[in-house]
Image (spheres, coloured by chain):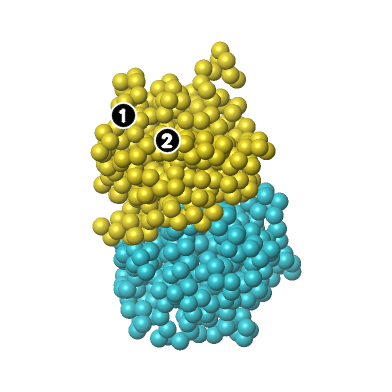
Chain colours: A cyan, B yellow
Amino acid sequence: MRGAVDPFPVSVEDIRAAAFRLHGAAVRTPLLEFSDLNQRTGGRVFIKPENLQVSGSFKFRGARNRISQLTESERRAGIVAWSSGNHAQGIAIAARLAGVNAAIVMPSDAPQIKIERTRAQEAEIVFYDRYTEDREAIGAKLAEERGAVLVPSYDDVHIIAGQGTAGLEIAEDLSVLGLRPDVLLCCCGGGGLIAGSALALRAFFPDVAVWAVEPEGFDDTARSLAAGERLQNDPSAKTICDALMAPTPGHMTFEINRAVLAGGLAVSDDETRAAIRYAATELKLVAEPGGAVALAAALTGKLELAGKTAVVVISGGNIDPELLAEILTF
Amino acid sequence: MRGAVDPFPVSVEDIRAAAFRLHGAAVRTPLLEFSDLNQRTGGRVFIKPENLQVSGSFKFRGARNRISQLTESERRAGIVAWSSGNHAQGIAIAARLAGVNAAIVMPSDAPQIKIERTRAQEAEIVFYDRYTEDREAIGAKLAEERGAVLVPSYDDVHIIAGQGTAGLEIAEDLSVLGLRPDVLLCCCGGGGLIAGSALALRAFFPDVAVWAVEPEGFDDTARSLAAGERLQNDPSAKTICDALMAPTPGHMTFEINRAVLAGGLAVSDDETRAAIRYAATELKLVAEPGGAVALAAALTGKLELAGKTAVVVISGGNIDPELLAEILTF
C-alpha cells in the first residue's frame, strides 16, 4: 500500500505486520463502555485502556515491534533508548523478553515507579537533567560508543507502526460491533501513538476525526497543526503529565499527523487530576496523568460528544501511588 | 437440562437465558492477562474484572435478570431489597433502567460511596444497624406493607442465574483461547456469584476446581463446606470486606456450592489490602476489599498456581477514595 496511494513513511500494512509480531506478547486491550461516561457526555464513548498493556502503557507495542526486527548482530550489540519512563519500561521488558541488553537514558526526576520498574527489568539506567541536558545527544553518543542500536521513542517507522496496532484493534472491535466512530481522542507527546493509530483507524473509517490532546504548556502539536509547521514549547513549562513533555512534534510523526489529524486540544493539570479521579472512582481504572488527558478532554467537553460515537485512549497507568492517593483525597 | 441429570435449583439453561436478558445492558467484561501476575504465581492467571461491570460490581447481572422478569403488576408495585451496598447499586440501576421503584435496606455504616451511588439512581434507602437489627426481617416487612416484590441478594434462582453469566463468559472466552482452566478463585459472601459461575464453568470444564475465598472471621462457607452443613460466623467479627459479611451461607447457594466447590480459603484484611495495592499499581485496576480477596489468595499462594491455568474474579471496585488512598500510601 506504499507509493502513490500512501504518501506516509508508515503504511497500514506496516501496522498489520506489527500486529502479527505483537500477537501473543502484547495484550489485546478491550474496548470498554461505561454507562456513566455515556450519560455524562451524551455520546457513546468507548475507552481503549492501554494502562492494561504489558509495561503499563502502550509503549510496549512499539518497543516489541522494533526489537523483534533486530538482526542477530544488532541483538548482540544491544540497544539504547531515552525516555521519561514509559518508553523505558516498554523497551526494558521487550528487551528482556528478547534477551537483548538495553541502556536507557531517563530524566533524574522521572516518577520513582517508572525508574524502579525499568530497573526491575534488568535494564541499565543513565540519568540526565530534563531541564539542562539533551537526552537525544546523550543517547546518540552512548549508542555510538557501544555500537548499539538507538531505539527512538516516536520518530521511527517501527515504533509508529507498533503503537498503531492500538488503533488497528479499535478499528477491528468497532467493526465487529457494527459501529462507525465519529471521534478518536488520544494523548500526544512525541505523536507516535496518535500517528499510528490515526493511520490504522482511518483505513477503516476515513471520516473519523482524530484529535490530539495535550497538557497546557505542551500543546506543541495543537499549535503546530494550526500553524502548519513544527513549533516548540516554552522550555520552562511544567505539567504533571510527565509522559507528554516532548519539546516539539517529531519530524516523522508530524509529517503524518498534519495530514491525518483534525486538530489539537489542551487540558489543564487540574482537569487531568479530575479525570484521574473519575477514572479511579467511576471507571475503576488507574490512569497516569499523561494517560488521562484524552479522558479529561471528553469530561470537560472540549469537544462536543453528544450524539457521537467516540473512542478515548487511556494510554498508561504508571502513576506513583502517593500521587494517586493525593489526587483521590483532593 | 433440569430433572434427573441436574439436581440443582439453577440450571445452565437458566444462566444462558439470563445472558440473553443481560445482552446489551450489562458489560461483557473481558478476561485480562498480566505478565507480572503470571510471573509471580508461576501459572497462567486471568482476571475477570467485574469492577468494570455496570454499577461497579457483578451485582448488576443478577438484578437485571430478576427485574427484567417482573410482571406488569409487579413492576407497578415496585421492589424491595437489602444490601451492604453492591446489590443495592445493582438493583437501583437495573430498577431505574426498567422504570421500577426500588426501596433498599442498607446498613448505616455502608461505605459512603455505595450509599451515594444508590441514592443517585433514585432509589429509596432505609437504614438499619448491621450489628443489632435483622435486615431480612426489615425488608420482608417493608415488602409486605407495600405489596412489593422482595429481591434477595443471593438466595434466588434468578439472582444466581444472573451472577452465573460471569462464569459463562469466562467459559466462552477460555474456549475461544483453546484453554482449559484448572482453578477458579472467586470471593464468597452469600455465595450467589460463585454458585452460578461454578455451574456455568463446570458445564464447559467439569474438572475445574472452584475455590471460595472469604475474609478471616467470615469463612462460613469454607467451614460449612468442610462440615457438610451451614455454619454461622461469630456475629462480632469485623473485616474491611464490607461486601462479604453475610452471616451464613445461603440455603439455595449452599445447596449448590456443597456439590460444586472444591473448598474454601480465608485471607486476612492485611492480605486483602496488599491485593488492593497490587491491583492498583500492577494491574491498574481499582478493586474494593471484598472484590480483592480472590486476588489476595492468588498472591499469597493459599493455593498453588504454578503450572496451572487459573481465573481470578475481581468482583467489584466500589471502594471509598479515602480508603483506597490510605491503602496506597500504607
Residue B43 visible here: no
Q: Is residue A318 left or right of residue A31?
A: left
- At mark 2, the secondary structure is helix
Residue placed most toward the observer, A272 or B161: B161
Residue count near mark 2 (Cα–Cα under 10 Å), binned few <14, some 14–19, many ≥20:
some
Q: Mark 2 points at which residue?
A: B136
Residue placed most toward the observer, B142 or B164: B142
Above or below, A283 relative to B260: below
Residue count near mark 1 (Cα–Cα under 10 Å), binned few <14, some 14–19, many ≥20:
some
Corner quadrant of residue B271: top left
Residue at 60% across, 64% down? A41
Residue placed most toward the observer, A161 or A272: A272
Badge number at residue B318? none
The percent coordinates of residue A91 (x first, y second) are: 42, 60
Q: What residue type is labelled 2?
A: Glu
Q: In which quarter of the image is the N terminus of chain B?
A: top right
The percent coordinates of residue B117 (x first, y second) are: 48, 55
Q: Name the residue under label 1.
A: B232
Q: Is residue A61 left or right of residue A89?
A: right
Residue placed most toward the observer, A106 or A263: A263
The answer to whether the residues at label 2 and label 1 have Cβ atoms under 8 Å apart is no
Q: Are marks 2 and 1 on the same chain?
A: yes
Q: Which amino acid does label 1 sit on?
A: Gln
Above or below, A81 relative to A234: above
Residue A258 visible here: yes
Gap in angstroms between the C-alphas marked 2 and 1:
16 Å
